[in-house]
Image (cartoon, rainbow, N blue to C red):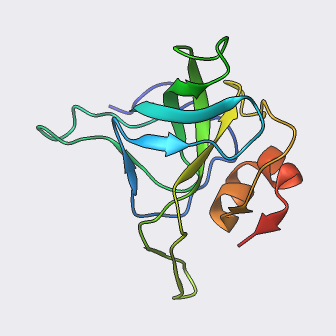
Amino acid sequence: MAKRGGKRTVGVPYRFHVTPGIFMNSLVPVADNSGAKLVRVIGVVGHYSKSVHRRIPGAGVGDMVVVVVREGKPELRKQIFRAIVVRQRRPYRRPDGTWVAFEDNAVVIVTPEGDPKGSEIHGPVAMEATLRWPTIANLASIVV
């Protein structure tokens, strides 16, 4: 019997396969001016962690994650937000055969609908993230 309802996605529904580079409990710097400096990943949106025994959910470039702010403005600390992964150190392969790896990991804090909370993004942003989240592409100064 077919499943009913289907998946409800936020952003562009298609996605390139990206090797996961950020996992649960990772401390990741924030690449925007929302006021948060360092966040801890506490979940990956759209990842069902009970599929394989003891598998830790991982996120790649362009994925939405659930984060808690560890360092930043006092009113943001200990608050839970959603964020988009815009850079990862782990190399991943693009469909044209090139391999991409960034110098650091980074996320951008967003609303549950996918709109960025900050008004600018520091550093380069992966092309996969801009294709999936057009609002992030508008704020990105460098797209790699």
The image quarter containing residue 71 is top right
From the viewer's side, name the closer residue of 59 and 39: 39
- Which residue appears farthest toward the left when viewing the image? 53
Q: Is residue 109 visible?
A: yes
Which residue is painted at 64% across and 14% down in the image?
Answer: 74
67 sits to left or right of 111: left
Residue 43 vs 120, above or below: the answer is: above
Which residue is painted at 22% across and 31% down in the image?
Answer: 50
Residue 10 locus on image (x, y percent): 65, 35
From the viewer's side, name the closer residue of 69 and 143: 69
Which quadrant, please, contains the N terminus? top left
Which residue is painted at 69% across and 66% down in the image?
Answer: 127
Which quadrant, please, contains the C terminus? bottom right
- Which residue appears farthest toward the top when viewing the image? 75
Residue 110 locus on image (x, y percent): 70, 32
Residue 117 vs 105, above or below: the answer is: above
Which residue is painted at 38% across and 33% down in the image?
Answer: 2
Residue 78 vs 40, above or below: the answer is: above
Residue 138 vs 54, above or below: the answer is: below
141 sits to left or right of 129: right
Residue 66 locus on image (x, y percent): 50, 28
Count the numbered circles shown: 0
Residue 59 locus on image (x, y percent): 43, 48
Q: Is residue 44 visible?
A: no
